Structure formats: structure tokens, C-alpha cells
């Protein structure tokens, strides 16, 4: 990319008058000439804070807020009027200027060369080389990096990741809302896109500068399913490269900026504007885990309760490993514990809380007022935060008070609990202190030292299905693990070995197929292009998001189009003695589980078998009783071990990982599926260009 010439452009734009017209009390619709946006007059909106017209010498920090796909400079004015202006007028955040650029309807704020109205638009160069110098020369801004932030929603959220990671010399903070990238299945959606502009690459290239002077607040709706993993992944890059950040998933909100702002807006804007005030950012720890020595122990048995010796027990995130003794017992000594977003410290009023990544997370079962009071160890109240919270989990930013130990009392109705917060080098983490019934003891004497943990416990033993479950148990001395006996193994044409499980009179693979050739050795064509997948009339396979990660491929398997498994295909994907199940065989599976007590509620009529089929990990969580996502530890009683590997749809798009699992039937172009919000095994039909996983059945 070409280097920007900020100083020269700033001098140039002093000579260009801005055309202005008010569209709201504090927002001006203005324009200037842009060579990068088609050699024409180009419009933007600018919010000026309340004192701008009366305090004629004051200069203000600036936030550039980027719109979503299909939008323009007018798309985000409601966001200013409904949230930012009230925050400022109520003195909850400092006064600042907010600029709402027009980046084109679908250019993702990149120099794409995309044609709009017969004009080439290049919003990256426009904002960096034209708009920022124009704003700094036309309005009373504080024009240094420490007073400039970038933010955006959806397509603009992607632009925010892009600008923040590419230009750390220009921005000090970033507020990302539900970012989505300019590619489908890793393929750009327009010509001219450069992979070098991918935020995953930019963060590596500029890691040192970002660590030294950037902070990121990333927010995504909890039911905006496809974007949670993407933003979580980029947030994790912040952790890896030591960029101060907060990542929050807003419960019960989809792709909806208004919904996000109602629950999370003030925390996000405060985190960004704290950079303007010089408030220290929460540093990022060396790992994702605050340091807490802790011991985890338990027993591994079979489903009949007989202890299993010699089973290997491992914490996947932390790496600690133990082997069960003759009595089936194990002990894992951790040097680290990961704090859970939802504490196990549940009260009578369904209130729970935990401290994680510098935020105090509160979970309430129903809409209710919540009060959080901060105490020092003498019992002196230091501050109080009051918020009305919808049902779900909410992250609350706490005032930075320097290194030390503080106690946080969380009250909602009659429910009350206390957490101990420990700020070391500015990174806040903590543990439960007590759940109040009635106690007059000084708060400082009620703090406990054990922290709730969250990690994946994996257990392996020859002759049994591999076991994986998320551990969130603060009582670490009695972890009970029941391993399901395996029926054996099956080996595909590539030499991959899969575990199998006996369910009724059927023997099923307990893993998704990942073979790349037919049983006669003929390769199945790999297709990474979404367009080619969409237009295919012959067999194709791929991996979700075209991943090359061997662990991910082994875990979720491959995705095949309908031509691979079609009965009209003379070549077979299954090895001898196995086959793709028919609709009738899927029904046999479901009927056996229903009639033999595998429904989640113990009934023997109607299909409520999804939890018994779904694996204990990988699924999005949910609080609805009986669905897959509700308490994953109760999943997988059948041993089917279904994972939410998603699909590749008829347009060649990947979606559904974390929420859906799809498997082909040999009957027509039918498939069967599980969804994290459902309690049943579903079925439907799709065209042959659809992409699903494959489970084989013996026979």
C-alpha cells in the first residue's frame, strides 16, 4: 500500500471549504472533494459536542464511526442521538467529536477499486489520506494519535479491526461491534481485495506498536452466531500480542447495534474514551488465565460405575495430564485456572457472577435491577454501579483503582453475593467470596481463595469412547467421569481410524468422516471456492472455512456435497461393511433412543433425544431447559458425540459452526440435523450443492 502524506494533505484541505447543513441538533451533514472516492464531492456527518459552539478555543478528541454494508454517512446518526450524545450530556464520557464517514455500500473500507455509480472508490486511502486531514484542519480537534479512535458496526466493525491493526500510529483505541469480514469461505467478495489487509495478518505485522498504544473493545450479539467465533478469534489475537482488550458477547442480541448499545454501549464507549483521559488500559496477561494454583481430582468409571484404571486425563487448554490409578482416581495440579464467564456460585434468586478479562460478569434469570458496590479490605464502600439488566449475562466495567484486592458486592432483589477482585498490574481477576444468607461478618474475612475453573477435560482409554467435557466446577475434589464403552473402530481409505459406538442394534461412527478419497482410492475433488461450490454438478468436498488445521479437521471432519453421497454415484465413500445411513436408519436411531429413556426429561414418547446425541463440548450455551446448549455436561448419554460442525450452504457460504450439526442421508438429498436451541433430531431436504458432514453406519 502507498504511504500516506498526512501533512501535505492537511495543508491542501485547509483551502477546500466544507459544504454544511444541519440534520440534527448536534450533527452536521458536510462535504468535501475526494479524489479517492470517485473524484467528486463526498459527504460525511459530524457530531459536535455541546460545548463546541460556546467554548471557542477548546479542542476535542475524535471518534470515527464506520457504518455497515449497504449504508452511508447517515446510517449511524441514530446511534449518536440515542446513545453517544446522552452519554456526553450526562457527563458519563468525555466530550468528543464523532465523524460518520461514507465508505461506500460494500467496499468494507478497503482500497478495493470497487465500482459504485461508475466511479472507483477506495475508502482506506480516503479516510487516512483525505478525511482525517480534512477533519483536523476544519474542526477544532486534538489531532494526535492519543486523541483519535476508530469504531464501527458490521462491515464497519471489520473496517475498525482493519484500521486499528493497520494504523496504530493514528489511533489509540477501537470499538468493534459485530464485525464481519469481506470474504465468504475465505474467498473475497469483490475483486481487488488484498489478503495482506486481513486483520489477522495486520496484527502480526504491527504487534509491537499495537501493544504499546492500542486498546480494543469488541462486542458481538450472543445470537449473531456466525460472528461470535470470528470476533473471538481476533480478540484472542489481542491477548496473544498483548494488546489491552475486552471481548464481550451480549446475550439475546443478534446483528443489532441498538440491542448491543442498550446493554453494552456505555461500557464500550467508556473503555474507548478512557484512552482520551489517560486512564490506564487493562493490560493483557501472558496467557488467557489469571494465576491461581489449584488442584482438580476425581474418578473415571464406566457407565456401570466400575472404576477404569489407566485412563489418560488431560486439561486441553492448560496441558496438565494425569493417569487414573487402580481405583480409577486422578489428580491434576494446575499452576493456572481460567475464570468462567458464569460463576457456579448460584443463589436462590438465580443470581451469579464472576470476574473475567477486567469485567465483572453478572448473570440474572429475569430482568431486574442490579447494584454493584466496591469495597476495600477495611469494608469501606468506594463506589456503586446500578444497572437494570435483561435476563442473561452482562459484563460491567469496574473503575480502575490500581494494584490491590477489592471486594465487590452484587445485589439483585433479595439475592446477594460477594466476589474478591485482585488487580495485579492493572489486570482484574477474582473468585467467589460468599453467598449471603444473613451475615454480619466483615467482608474482608469472607473472601475465599479458590476460583471457579473452566477448561476442557479430555479422557482417553482404549476400548472406550474419547470423553470431552467443559469443567466449570469450583468443587474440584469430586469430578465424576463416566466413559461409554466403544464398539470398536473403522478405518477409511486414507487410513484414518474412527471410534464407533453401539446404539441399540446399530453400530455408528462416533466421529465425522474426513476421508479425501473413495474406497477404490479415487480422490474426491477438494473445492475451496464458494462460487465453484455453488455451481458444482459433480462430487466435491471441503473443510469448514477451508481450514488446514489438522486438529480442527480431526474434530469436525470434512464437508461433502450431495453428489458425493448420492446413490447414483457409482463410487462409494464408505469402506466395505459400512454405508451412509438412510432416512429409515436415522429414524431407527431416534426411535430407539426415545423409547429407551434417552429423552432429556425421561419420557418415552416424542423425540427429545438431541442432548443424548450431542457432544459435551463445542455447542453454544443456552439456558432453555432440555435443549442441547443447556448444561453441556448432561449431553451425549448415547455416545453419538455429535459436534456442531456447521455446513456449506447452496451459495457456497460456511455457517452454523457452534450452533448446528448437519449429516447426510443416503435417501434423496435429505439430511438430518441438531441445533443448540432444539431438543430433537431434525430432518429436511436440500439440493446436491449443499454441504454436510457424514456419519457412517455398519451393515
Image: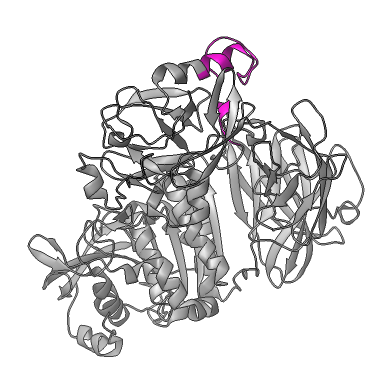
- Evaluate whether residue 108 shows in this view: yes
Horizontal side of residue 78 vs 264, given as left or right: left
* 166 relative to 93, above or below: below
Q: Is residue 602 magenta?
A: yes
Closer to the camera in the image, 515 or 221 = 515
Horizontal side of residue 659 vs 74, given as left or right: right
Residue drawn at 49 percent across, 81 percent down? 209
Q: Is residue 266 magenta?
A: no
Horizontal side of residue 309 vs 503, given as left or right: right
* 367 relative to 218, above or below: above
Residue drawn at 68 percent across, 36 percent down? 464
* 504 relative to 95, above or below: above
Residue drawn at 66 percent across, 30 percent down? 634
Give the magenta range: 589-615
Q: Quadrant of the N terminus?
A: bottom left
Residue 564 position within the rendered picture, expressed as x and y whole percent measured from the top left = 31, 36
Residue 577 position within the rendered picture, expressed as x and y whole percent measured from the top left = 47, 28
Residue 391, image quadrant: top right
User: Residue farthest to the left?
Assistant: 118
* 521 relative to 49, above or below: above
Closer to the camera in the image, 169 or 88 = 169
Closer to the camera in the image, 549 or 95 = 549
Residue 157 position within the rendered picture, expressed as x and y whole percent measured from the top left = 38, 59
**Callout count:** 0
Closer to the camera in the image, 97 or 621 = 621
Amino acid at each position: 500500500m502507498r504511504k500516506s502524506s498526512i501533512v501535505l494533505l492537511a495543508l491542501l484541505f485547509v483551502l477546500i471549504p466544507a459544504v454544511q447543513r444541519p440534520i440534527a441538533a448536534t450533527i452536521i451533514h458536510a462535504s468535501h472533494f475526494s479524489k479517492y472516492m470517485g473524484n467528486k464531492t463526498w459527504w460525511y456527518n459530524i457530531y459536535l459536542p455541546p460545548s463546541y459552539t460556546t467554548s471557542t478555543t477548546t479542542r476535542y478528541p475524535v471518534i470515527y464511526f464506520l457504518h455497515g454494508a449497504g449504508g452511508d454517512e447517515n446510517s449511524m446518526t441514530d446511534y449518536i442521538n440515542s446513545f453517544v450524545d446522552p452519554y456526553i450530556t450526562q457527563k458519563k464520557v468525555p466530550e468528543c467529536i464523532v465523524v460518520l464517514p461514507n465508505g461506500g455500500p460494500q467496499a468494507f473500507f478497503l482500497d478495493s477499486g470497487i465500482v459504485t455509480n461508475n466511479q472507483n472508490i477506495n475508502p482506506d486511502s480516503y479516510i487516512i489520506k483525505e478525511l482525517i486531514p480534512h477533519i483536523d484542519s476544519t474542526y477544532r480537534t486534538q489531532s494526535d494519535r492519543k486523541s483519535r479512535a476508530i469504531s464501527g458496526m458490521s462491515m464497519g466493525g471489520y473496517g475498525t479491526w482493519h484500521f486499528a491493526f493497520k494504523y496504530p500510529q493514528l489511533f489509540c483505541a477501537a470499538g468493534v461491534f459485530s464485525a464481519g469480514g469481506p470474504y465468504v469461505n475465505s474467498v473475497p467478495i469483490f475483486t481487488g481485495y488484498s489478503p495482506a489487509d486481513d486483520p489477522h495478518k495486520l496484527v502480526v505485522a504491527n504487534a509491537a506498536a499495537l501493544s504499546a498504544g492500542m486498546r480494543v473493545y469488541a462486542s458481538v450479539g450472543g445470537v449473531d452466531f456466525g460472528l461470535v467465533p470470528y470476533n473471538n478469534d481476533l480478540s484472542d489475537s489481542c491477548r496473544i500480542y498483548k494488546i489491552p482488550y475486552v471481548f464481550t458477547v451480549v446475550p439475546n442480541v443478534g446483528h443489532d447495534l441498538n440491542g448491543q448499545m442498550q446493554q453494552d454501549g456505555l461500557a464500550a464507549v467508556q473503555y474507548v474514551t478512557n484512552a482520551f483521559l489517560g486512564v490506564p488500559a487493562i493490560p493483557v496477561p501472558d496467557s488467557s488465565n489469571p494465576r491461581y494454583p489449584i488442584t482438580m481430582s476425581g474418578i473415571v468409571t464406566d457407565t456401570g460405575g466400575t472404576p477404569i484404571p489407566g485412563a489418560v486425563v488431560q486439561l486441553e487448554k492448560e496441558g496438565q495430564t494425569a493417569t487414573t490409578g487402580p481405583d480409577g482416581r486422578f489428580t491434576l495440579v494446575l499452576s493456572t485456572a481460567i475464570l468462567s464467564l458464569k460463576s457456579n456460585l448460584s443463589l436462590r434468586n438465580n443470581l451469579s457472577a464472576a470476574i473475567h478479562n477486567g469485567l465483572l460478569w453478572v448473570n440474572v434469570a429475569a430482568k431486574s435491577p442490579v447494584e454493584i458496590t466496591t469495597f476495600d479490605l477495611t469494608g469501606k464502600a468506594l463506589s456503586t454501579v446500578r444497572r437494570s439488566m435483561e435476563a442473561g449475562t452482562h459484563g460491567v466495567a469496574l473503575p480502575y483503582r490500581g494494584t490491590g484486592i477489592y471486594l465487590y458486592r452484587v445485589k439483585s432483589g433479595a439475592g446477594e453475593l460477594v466476589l474478591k477482585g485482585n488487580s495485579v498490574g492493572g489486570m482484574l481477576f477474582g473468585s467467589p467470596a460468599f453467598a449471603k444468607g444473613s451475615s454480619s461478618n466483615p467482608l474482608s474475612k469472607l473472601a475465599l481463595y479458590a476460583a471457579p475453573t473452566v477448561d476442557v477435560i479430555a479422557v482417553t482409554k482404549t476400548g472406550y469412547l474419547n470423553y470431552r467435557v467443559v469443567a466449570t466446577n469450583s468443587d474440584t475434589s469430586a469430578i465424576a467421569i463416566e466413559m461409554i464403552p466403544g464398539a470398536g473402530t473403522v478405518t477409511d481409505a486414507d487410513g484414518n481410524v474412527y471410534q464407533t459406538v453401539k446404539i441399540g442394534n446399530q453400530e455408528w461412527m462416533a466421529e465425522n468422516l474426513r476421508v479425501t478419497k473413495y474406497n477404490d482410492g479415487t480422490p474426491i475433488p477438494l473445492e475451496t471456492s464458494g462460487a465453484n461450490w455453488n455451481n458444482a454438478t459433480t462430487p466435491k468436498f471441503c473443510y469448514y472455512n477451508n481450514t488446514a488445521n489438522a486438529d480442527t479437521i480431526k474434530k469436525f471432519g470434512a464437508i461433502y456435497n450431495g453428489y458425493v453421497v448420492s446413490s447414483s454415484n457409482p463410487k462409494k465413500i464408505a469402506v466395505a461393511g459400512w454405508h451412509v445411513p438412510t432416512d429409515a436408519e436415522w429414524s431407527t436411531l431416534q426411535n430407539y433412543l426415545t423409547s429407551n429413556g434417552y429423552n432429556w426429561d425421561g419420557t418415552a414418547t416424542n423425540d427429545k433425544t438431541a442432548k443424548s446425541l450431542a457432544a459435551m463440548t463445542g455447542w453454544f450455551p443456552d439456558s432453555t431447559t432440555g435443549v442441547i446448549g443447556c448444561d453441556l455436561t448432561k449431553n451425549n448419554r448415547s455416545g453419538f458425540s455429535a459436534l456442531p460442525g456447521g455446513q456449506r450452504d447452496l451459495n457456497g457460504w460456511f455457517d452454523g459452526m457452534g450452533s448446528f450439526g448437519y449429516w447426510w442421508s443416503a435417501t434423496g438429498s435429505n439430511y438430518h440435523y441438531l441445533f443448540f436451541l432444539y431438543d430433537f433430531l431434525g430432518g429436511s431436504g436440500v439440493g446436491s450443492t449443499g454441504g454436510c458432514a457424514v456419519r457412517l453406519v455398519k451393515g
